[in-house]
Amino acid sequence: MSTTRQIAHNTIVQITGKILSTFLGLLAIGIMTRYLGQEQFGWYVTAITFLQFVGILIDFGLIPVTAQMLSEPHFDKKKLLKNLLGFRFVSAVLFLGLAPLAALLFPYPREVKIAISFTSLSFLAIAMNQVLVGYYQHKLSMHMQAMGEVIGRVFLIGGLWFVTTKGYGFLPVMTVVTLSSLVYTAVLWIHVYQKEKTGFSFEATIWKAIMTKMWPIAISIIFNVVYLKGDTIILSLFWPQETVGIYGAAYRVIDILAQTAMMLMGLMLPILAFNWSRNIKAEFKHRYQQAFDAMMMLAFPMLIGVLVLAKKIMVLVAGEEFVASGSALQILALAVFGVYLGAVFGHTAVAINKQKQTMWIYISDAVLTLIGYLIFIPVYGIMGAAWMTVFSELYAGLLLWIVIRHYSGVSLEMKTFSKIVFSSLVMGSALIILNRFNVLLLVLIAAAVYSLFLFGLDGISKKTMREIVSMRE
């Protein structure tokens, strides 16, 4: 099987899983918003965002680091995997163990502080997933990650249905959220264990190599967290929990849509790293262009579609009580486009070992965005948070593109992108004309119109499609 087919089949399986998990994730948001209401959903958003803040601080870029190190010939693969898991577990326990204590210093309701105390277990599981997902990226076996995510989401939906129909309240809802993450991690761990008989190892030489590889990414991510989660944290300090709930509902939809960017670039990272590390420049350029085109193929129509359908989407997902979230969702759609740009060029920076050269982007972005948050959120609330989020994502994405172009010596072609933009604008026009129809029907119409024009304009090459669907090796 060719590399293109392997990546494509892997991508198709994972996208199928992602579509299903996205649907289940949106369904979970719908159950929670309708059951909890604006204030208690604000509690949920505050607790999750607080822990996400800590979780991103200790991310250390271990997904791309794992995929990259396993693609390099320096260490025995099984020994390296055990040390990566050991390093992840120790660092996560140390930092997440402090989160409940830190929460006591914030003026949050008692229920939020209790939720933070036990939901930290969910984020320990998520932290362990980083190494496991990196392993699956290296093996080009991301279908297992998709399967684990879907199983976790099915558990989440079942659990939420049970606790909400019984009327158990906010804290049992948070318990279900925590258990669903543990189920997801268990699925990934069991499969890896069957293949590798893995566990934890603590070898100083390998830990030193891990820290050497990760520290530029870790510093970038520490600053990254300021503009990724600082908006909701600051909003929760200056505005009521109902406001946090309205903003958080839109942000959760955007979060789910943005996860696809990391999934796709996770598939491409080992291939980019392999070709760059072995100086196979022509193949690197081909894969880099392929990654950019694939990401834009999703990002731009998503941007146009959400701009047109935002209020309908929020009513469908969260209910009439959250119709005000539609305005925030329209603005945040622009941020998602920036996330996709950042995913392409941020992962490419890791692949070509230029993490250090991109640190200044994340640091300056964090400083500028934090200043913006502190100026605009106390005065403008949701609108201030949303527009500064757009600024932060586009700032990072565009500057990363310039830096990667400089260090890789590769300029991206825009021929396919221009076809994507045209097809997306036609799709958007169709949505505006047919806006009176049901939102689910509009999504299907949008997909059909976009696909028809993109294929008609040869936005996806027939050669690539023939290779993907061919059953011959």
Image: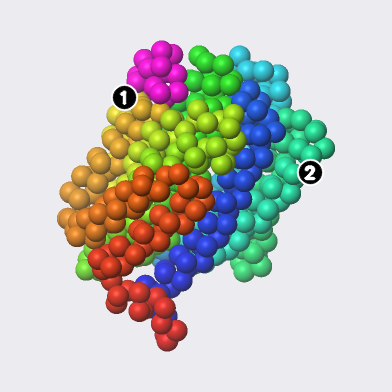
- Circle 1 is placed at which residue position? 368
Quadrant, the N terminus = bottom left
Residue range highlighted in magenta: 370-385
Evaluate whether residue 203 shows in this view: no
In the image, what residue type sits under mark 1? Leu
The secondary structure that most of the magenta stretch takes on is helix
- Judge from the rendering whether residue 428 lies leftward or rightward of residue 240; answer left or right: left
**Can the viewer see residue 256?**
yes
| Residue designated by label 2 | 162
Tell me the quadrant of the picture where the C terminus can be found. bottom left
Residue displayed at 71% across by 51% down = 155
Q: Where in the figure is residue 240, as x and y percent of width and height?
A: 56, 16
Name the mark on residue 224.
Answer: none
Q: How is the image coloured?
A: rainbow
In the image, is residue 47 part of the stretch drawn in magenta?
no
Q: Amino acid under label 2?
A: Phe
**As drawn, is 302 to the left or to the right of 157?**
left
- Residue 214's spot in the image, x, y percent? 42, 45
**Magenta stretch containing residue 375, yes or no?**
yes
Most foreground residue, 313 or 102 = 313
Please give the name of the residue rendered at 47% of the width and 36% of the height, measured from the top-left corner. Answer: 311
Q: Is residue 148 above or below residue 234?
A: below
- Which of pointers 2 and 1 indicates the residue nearer the eye? 2
80 over 389 or under it: above or below: below
Residue at 74%, 49% (x, y): give it: 158
Q: In the rendered image, which quarter is residue 148 located in?
A: bottom right
> Which quadrant of the figure has residue 454?
bottom left
Residue in view at x 69 percent, y 47 percent:
156
**Local secondary structure at mark 1:** helix
The secondary element bearing badge 2 is classed as: helix
Q: Decide which of 185, 382 is in the foreground and name it.
A: 382
